[in-house]
Image (spheres, rainbow, N blue to C red):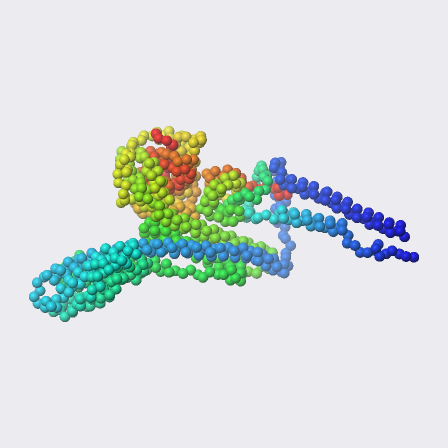
Amino acid sequence: MTNITAERRRRRQGTGRFWLVALLLNGAVLVPFLVWQDLRRSEFVITPPTAAELAAERRRQEELARQPLPELRKVQVVEAKRAIERQKKAELQVQVEELQELTEVIAAQKEEQLAVLKARDDQDLLTQLVAAVQAQAAVVAEQAEQLANSPRPEIDPANDHAAQLRDQAKRLQSEAAGLATTPVAAPAAKSAAAPGGGSEAASEPAPEITTETETTSPPAAAAEAESRTATAAVDTSAASAPELSLTTTLNDPARAAKVAELAKTVAATSAQVAAEQPSLQSTTLAARAETLASQARRLAAQDAAAALAGYSAEPLLTPSDLAALDASALFAAAQKVAQQQSAESADSAAAELALTQNTSFQQALQAVAAPTAPSAASTAALHTALRQEPQTRSELNAYAQALDQAISETAAAVERARNASRSAADRAAARQGGERTLTLAGAQAAVATQQALDSASLQRDGTRAMMVDLSGLMQQVYRGGGNSSDSGIRAGSNREDGGVGMAAAIPPRQLQLDAGRIQAQALPGRKFSRASARSGWLFIDSWYVVGPFENHGKIDFTKRHPPEAGIDLDGRYLGKNGTALTWNYLQSNVMRINPPGERSDSTYYGFTEVWFEEATDMLLAVASDDAAKVWINNIVVWQDTGLSPWQLDEGFCKVRFQKGYNPILVRLENGPGPCYYSILLCPGDL
Amino acid sequence: MHMDTDEDEGVEVPMSPLIDCVFLLLIFFLVTTMMKKEQRDIDIDLPTSISALEVAPDDQKLVIGIDSAGALYVDGRPITRDRLYHRLADIAQSEPDKHIRLDCDQMTPFAGVVEILDLCQFRNLRNVGVRTYDDKYNR
């Protein structure tokens, strides 16, 4: 018995050993196999297959692809559809939530820009209105004075309408003068200065104008009716005179309306005086009409801006709301948010453009391209595909593809929103930074740069260009901190500021170059370092170009287009004849850059960057057909006007580049015929 | 006759097959974990090449994709040109040696490929490769 038990134990041990050996053998085979597979995948050099092998493999795969797959059962299709939808819907929902957040951010940025824009419009409006009222009141007072001094024995002196008109006109004049002397841009100081001369005069009770004049004729009767209205308006404005002293916030449309009301009163008084003495009508009435028309336009513009500022976005969908939607509804929500985001971005870009170009919001809005949206047909087809219940394998594949496309389109919208938000933030930071850091030295240097360019342009002797040394001025601008501001430096490049005489310290000198040799030897390049093997003249060959914008056959650099407000390589603009414009990458193997799709009477922009190992002075040669304006680091370094063919030695200046990347923007104005431009750089002096 | 059946006929769990199963499960999970990588490919037809060199997989590389319509992608996600422009500038500062792989469709406009290559070169990003398709590696 003991033997039997021992035998069984031995058998069990033998069985255990067998399995152990089997396991080891299994592992010994499997592990080297996997290692071999891994090594095979990581092999660095593989003998390429022959063309015959490739063709055979391709045929085999094509044959496999042609074989129909077995059809799925309906239950399988339904389950597969649910699984696909669950997975993709979660991804789509995340994108919609992000898109909503970005849209909120962009809307907030737009509101901020519109508030700044509206404050500027308010200031402009008030300045204009006050000036108009003052001028009109002065004229009316003068006429009323003449009227009162004219001998009119038939009128009772105690009830002399002319004398009352004179008093009223003088009071209005005083009130208008008070408005004009009140500072516009300092609300805190205004409240203290509010009870000034104008306000005191206006707060006095207006003299009652009696209407029992004996010299009533039909025109005079109408004037009397106006007079009643005018008197009431004067009383109203007199009662609210402290508010007219601009103590309220600049964004109060009611205040501007009250100023307009005062202007209307002055105009009514003016008409009354004119009715009393028709010989004085001509210039006064014309001025009044012009003033009122201008005032009405400004008020209308302000109303439009206010309406836009008050625009409220659609309420956001919560995550739970989004989770309750099916894929089709979710995509529809994404489309709706994307459209809202596009509209907000366009408004934001237009507001920024209006701020930098000093134009109205409506004009800027016309310059900004309409928001891009997928075609209605493709969107409708996508919605249809997402709504269907697949029954077969092919329908299931179509459904999955539609979901992928929906996700892809939403992801693209999210990316656009991210970019728009970042661009708006950058522009606002640049604008605010410029306002904060632009020093007098920087502004003066920028102005001097412009003057030096003008001086060189004037002294061009027909065949040889003058070389202007701008390096010192540019260095001064860099030190002045003004280079961070688009609006600051570009706005400072007009000639109305200081800096007079700075350009005169750097007289242009004549430069003569061998254009043929330069054209033959110049090499492309955008990176400059001491160790570079390339020397001599280098031309910039890689550009982002956008155009054509409309210039109506007139070279006018004061009319600015969106690229001057900030470079956004994803920007879409409205160009000549309403065409949508985008930036195009252009690399040329010759120095002369020809914008794609050139048109006559058009404006083009070219943008690129150059890199310098260290701050370097370079000789810059600009040539253009016809006129061009060039910015380096947002500083105007070249501007020529007039229709001229492309000439390599058209203009030179010595410029200073900063260490690192330096943006270059070229504005090319084309008249009739072709258009070209070139930018060449040469280290050192010649 | 006494038969000792209590300890000899007792039911025991066979450990060896169990260990074998566990071992196979372990291998299965190891392999599937290795295969689960971030999906960074886009739906394009890569150009065919029979002379390309295979490089070791690198999950840290930046994958820039351009589809047949010229749309840009980074790591499988759409990106705009301006965004890519600035992103490459950031990468050039933080990781100048970063490996960049360019995935282009056979029908991608060549100007788009040149633009990205030129941008990388300008930003001093020189570790750039173009992905191609080779049947040999897909057998």
In the picture provided, is B38 more to the left or to the right than A438?
Answer: right
In percent of width and height, residue A548 lies at 37, 46
* Residue farthest to the bottom, as pictured: A212
In percent of width and height, residue A426 lies at 41, 48
**Image quadrant where residue A302 sits:** bottom left
Quadrant showing the C terminus of chain A? top left
* Residue farthest to the front, as pictured: A192
In percent of width and height, residue A185 lies at 29, 54
Along the line of sight, the residue nearer the viewer: A8 or A345: A8
Which residue is pictured at 47% across the width and 45% down the height? Answer: B87
Which residue is pictured at 22% across the width and 66% down the height? Answer: A235
Along the line of sight, the residue nearer the viewer: B27 or A518: B27
Is any part of residue A525 visible from this angle?
no
Which residue is pictured at 44% across the width and 31% down the height? Answer: A532
- Whether residue A186 is situated above or below residue A651 in the rendered picture: below
* Residue farthest to the right, as pictured: B1
Number of numbered discs overlaid on the protein picture: 0
Along the line of sight, the residue nearer the viewer: B123 or A223: B123
**Image quadrant where residue A632 sits:** top left
Is any part of residue B36 visible from this angle?
yes
Which residue is pictured at 57% across the width and 58% down the height? Answer: A86
In the picture provided, is A485 more to the left or to the right than A70?
Answer: left
In the picture provided, is A515 more to the left or to the right than A90?
Answer: left
In percent of width and height, residue A72 lies at 63, 57
